[in-house]
Structures are given as C-alpha cells and as structure tokens.
C-alpha cells in the first residue's frame, strides 16, 4: 500500500515568508520517518514530536516507511512551526482523513508530545506572506489565532490540540474548549510603548521640550546632554507619546517584527503606537542590532522600528556596540549574516542618546564638577564622531532652577497639544514629499534639498559659513536643512526662512565640550 498527501506551511526568513509544500509519502519497507528539504535540527527532530503526538491523540502510527519532503528543497527550513503540517500530511496519507481536506490549507504550529499545539513565533508575517500569493486557509495554534486573524482575507482557524485538527480535517465538530473564538483586540497593550507620562511634567527645560517636538515632527535623531536630574530620560520617554499613530503599512511591519521576536502580547491586534526600546548600557552588539546562532533574531533597533530607540548613559555603552548602530541608523535596515543564512530586519528608528557631560556627573553641573577638560573630552569621545554626526539634534540641558519647580503659572504644553502640532507638521511634510516617496523631512535626500528644493543663498548663509569653517560636515549641512524644513512645518510656513535655518543650526551644534 502506498499513500501520498500534500499540505502547506509557511517558512520564515527574518520577517519575510515563503510557502512550503509538505509532502508525505508512505511506502512498504523498513518502518521509519525521514524528513528532507534542508531541515535544521529543530525541523529534523519533528519526527519524534509528531509520532508521539499522533499516538497520544488516539491515532495509529503508520507501520511503513514514511518520507516527508519540504519543498522547495533548496530553501533552508528553520523552527518548529512545520510540526502540524507534517502530522496532517502523514495522517491524510495513511487514510485517517480525506485528502481533499488539505486542498489549499496551510498549517502552522509546534506539537507537544501529548498532542497539544504550542504557539510559535512569526505567525502574523507567515500568514501575511501566504495570503499575498493566494494561500488563504490556515490552521494555527489557538494562542496565535488573534494575530493571524489580523491578515485581511485570510480564513483562520485556531486549535489547541491535534485531536481538534483531526476533527476539522474529517469535517467533525471539535470539543468546545479546543477552538479559539476570541476576537482580536483593536490595539496592542502598552508593553511596546514608553512609560506613560505627560510632556508637561518636564519643568524648566524649554529647549529640551522644543527639541522633542522638532524631533517628533521631522523624524529626527536626538542627543540630550546635561547633568543628572536635568530631565533627559523624562524627555526621551515622552517622545513616543507625541509621535502620530502608525499607519497601516508601518503597523504591519512593526507587528511582523514583534511576532518574529516573540514579544507580541497574546490577544493583541496590530501595533498602532510607536514602539519604545531602552536597552541597558551593558547590552551587547547582538542585543542591539540582532544576532544569535543559526538564523539571527531581531535586536533592540529592529524592535524599535517605526519608534524610538533610547540609549541612556550612552557613553557607558561599549564603543563597539555604539558603532554597530551607525549603518542601520543610516540605512533603516539591519543585515545580519550568520551560519543559518543572511536575514534583513527593518530598523527605521528615531535614535535618542542621553549622556552626562562628564564622568563625575554631579547634579550641580559645572559649579561642582572636578573633571578636567581632557577627562570630559575622553568621556564624551566614547560616542564616536561618525555616530554623533548622524544625530540631527544635539541639545545641552542646564540644571533645573528652583523657580521652575515651584512656578504654578505658564504651565508647559501637555503632550496632547504637542502631538496635535506634530500631526499638522507631519501632514504638511507628507503633502510636500508624499508623491516623491518620502515620509518625513528626515528621509529627504540631501541632493533634493540642494537642487530642486534649494533655498535662497541669503537664507542658508549661516549654515554655509559653518560648513566652510569646518564646524559642519557635508552630512551635517544636509541635516540642518532637514531640521529647517521641520521648523517651517511647525510654524505653518511653506518653506524655511533665515530664522528657521539659524535655529536649525543651533539645534544641530548645541553640544559644547570644554
């Protein structure tokens, strides 16, 4: 007796998915199970998990030679999400369910030895990739059902056990507690966002609040320098709150990254809030940009995609870890080559650095500092020049005065007001650049700002002098122009004037090291 069946699964390579044909062939011969198609160790070990799960689900294991092929055979297969498709193909090939039940059906999930279906990472991008090529019917673990159901047009069924899947293939009703039936949530809970707080809580730092507003309106990177207690961390934590909600495209990208990383909360919907990541200063290169053995996992910069990556006490990070951010920050993408292959993760973030001006870090600032000028330069020199040159806004904060702490009048603008101004500024930039494919002022190429969008010579006189004097690099010159366009958008002007360019220049070169 020879049996054959074909099911479908979806393999992931980073956040990109590809449909995998799972073929099962039963033939006379020495009993055993062989899995072909470049499986990694996790896939190869499926033979033991699948056999135990089938037997513990009350089914007979075929006493034949079983060959399972994962095609295309030249594409490496990673992870445990092929277990369910392998089990279904073997059961149908052995006659336990009709072959027609697998037509156009993809199955994703890891099997426990007792037949339970465990959730796996990356279900959302996997279902999205399959739906893009016309594969619209899915069986997924109940714990992944809510995220899989977010994909438009996909018909998704959630099951908790292999028994429930067998009942589905046979056209029978599953046990009441075996099916997932909860509707997906409208928005993700707060763990991906910064701590809740209002920008009005930051007192006495008008320049710092202005810098946060400009950074949010234009998508600019930001560096905050000042003594302890000046409000650097508070300002950084409130930046995601003034960023606009993610549009559909950005929400899908962010949700896919967190699904692959396994950080997407169970029962959540598309991530609509800008993510926030604040790794500790002891974080390694792999923790920041991604890594690991086999196929690399996303790091903090990818988990902060379309949001904020905050590095507090940035000079305390290892220089190697900081320099590893240079290329991803510039390109908006991380490319990681490991033994399991080369993967790409999106990494379009707003980088925020915070640092004390010197090693002693006295709260009183310069009045009590005992550090020599050489020590100060050496401390801040841990942030390399090439990385700092990629930071658009560099602001030095002064210690907060007592008058600011007790001032009951002239309360600073709350987050809601600043967020409204940011939305208006982003809308103006989108109307100007949208047809050209640029989403924010920070994304506009410098060549465009110096050619068809060139400002009059008298408007850019100050920044041109700074470039000729060696205060700015050519990259810094372009970044000043981008900031100036953001300042014009916040003011409601169609193009920057001389005041916008001069303010942009001061925000750019605000760091003073003595």
Image (cartoon, helix red, strand yellow):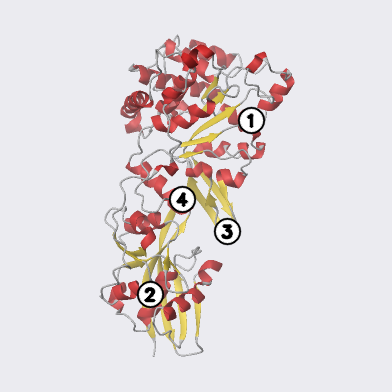
Q: How busy is the neighbourhood of tag 4: few (under 14 within 10 Å), some, or many (20 plus)?
A: some
Q: Quadrant of the N terminus?
A: bottom left
Can the viewer see residue 221? Answer: no
Which of pointers 4 and 2 lies earlier in the amino acid sequence?
Answer: 2
Dot label at residue 88: 2
Disc 4 is placed on an element classified as loop
Dot label at residue 142: none
**Which is more foreground, mark 4 or mark 2?**
4
Which of pointers 1 and 2 lies earlier in the amino acid sequence?
Answer: 2
- What is the CA distance from the residue labelled 3 to the residue labelled 2? 27 Å
Q: Percent x, y for residue 221?
A: 50, 29
Which residue sits at x=47%, y=28%? 220
According to the picture, the residue beneath numbered tag 1 turns out to be: 383
Residue 350 position (above or below residue 184): above
- What is the CA distance from the residue labelled 4 to the residue labelled 2? 28 Å
According to the picture, the residue beneath numbered tag 3 turns out to be: 294
Q: Quadrant of the C terminus?
A: top right
Q: Percent x, y for residue 215?
A: 45, 26
Disc 1 is placed on an element classified as loop
Side of 234 relative to 359 (left or right): left
**Which is more foreground, mark 1 or mark 4?**
4
Dot label at residue 263: 4
**Which is more foreground, mark 3 or mark 4?**
4
Q: How busy is the neighbourhood of tag 1: few (under 14 within 10 Å), some, or many (20 plus)?
A: many
Side of 447 relative to 434 (left or right): right
- What is the CA distance from the residue labelled 3 to the residue labelled 4? 20 Å
Can the viewer see residue 235? Answer: yes
Residue 233 position (above or below residue 114): above
């Amino acid at each position: 007796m020879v049996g054959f069946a074909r099911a479908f699964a979806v393999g992931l390579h980073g956040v990109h998915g590809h449909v995998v044909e799972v073929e099962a062939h039963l033939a006379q011969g020495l009993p055993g199970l062989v899995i072909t198609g470049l499986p990694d160790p996790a896939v190869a070990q499926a033979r033991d998990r699948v056999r135990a799960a089938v037997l513990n689900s009350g089914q007979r294991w075929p006493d034949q030679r079983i060959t399972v092929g994962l095609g295309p055979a030249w594409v490496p297969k990673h992870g445990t999400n092929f277990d369910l498709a392998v089990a279904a193909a073997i059961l149908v090939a052995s006659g336990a369910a009709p072959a027609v039940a697998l037509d156009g059906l993809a199955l994703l999930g890891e099997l426990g030895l007792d037949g339970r279906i465990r959730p796996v990472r990356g279900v959302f991008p996997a279902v999205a990739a399959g739906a893009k090529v016309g594969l619209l019917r899915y069986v997924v673990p109940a714990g992944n059902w809510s995220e899989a159901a977010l994909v438009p047009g996909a018909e998704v069924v959630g099951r908790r056990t292999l028994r429930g899947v067998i009942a589905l293939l046979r056209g029978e009703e599953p046990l009441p507690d075996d099916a997932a039936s909860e509707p997906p949530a409208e928005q993700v809970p707060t763990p991906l966002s910064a701590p809740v707080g209002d920008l009005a809580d930051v007192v006495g730092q008008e320049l710092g609040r202005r810098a946060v507003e400009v950074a949010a309106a234009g998508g600019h990177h930001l560096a905050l320098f000042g003594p302890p207690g000046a409000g650097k961390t508070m300002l950084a934590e409130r930046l995601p709150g003034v960023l606009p909600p993610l549009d559909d495209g950005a929400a899908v990208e962010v949700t896919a990254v967190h699904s692959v990383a396994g950080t997407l909360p169970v029962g959540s919907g598309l991530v609509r809030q800008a993510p926030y990541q604040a790794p500790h200063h002891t974080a390694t290169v792999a923790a920041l940009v991604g890594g690991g053995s086999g196929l690399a996992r996303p790091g903090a910069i990818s988990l902060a995609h379309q949001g904020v990556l905050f590095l507090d006490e940035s000079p305390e990070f290892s220089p190697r870890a900081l320099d590893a951010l240079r290329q991803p920050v510039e390109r908006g993408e991380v490319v990681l080559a490991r033994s399991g292959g080369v993967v790409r993760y999106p990494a379009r973030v707003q980088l925020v650095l915070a640092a004390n001006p010197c090693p002693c870090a006295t709260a009183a600032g310069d009045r009590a500092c005992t550090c020599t000028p050489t020590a100060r330069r050496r401390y801040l020199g841990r942030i390399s020049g090439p990385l700092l040159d990629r930071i658009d806004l560099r602001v030095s904060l002064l210690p907060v005065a007592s008058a600011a702490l007790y001032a009951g009048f002239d309360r600073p603008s709350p987050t809601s007001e600043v967020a409204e101004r940011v939305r208006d500024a982003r809308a103006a930039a989108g109307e100007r650049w949208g047809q050209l494919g640029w989403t924010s002022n920070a994304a506009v190429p410098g060549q465009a700002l110096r050619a068809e969008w060139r400002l009059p010579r008298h408007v850019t006189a100050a920044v041109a002098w700074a470039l000729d004097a060696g205060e700015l690099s050519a990259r810094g010159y372009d970044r000043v122009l981008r900031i100036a366009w953001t300042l014009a958008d916040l003011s409601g002007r169609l193009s920057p004037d001389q005041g916008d360019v001069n303010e942009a220049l001061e925000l750019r070169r605000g760091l003073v090291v003595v």
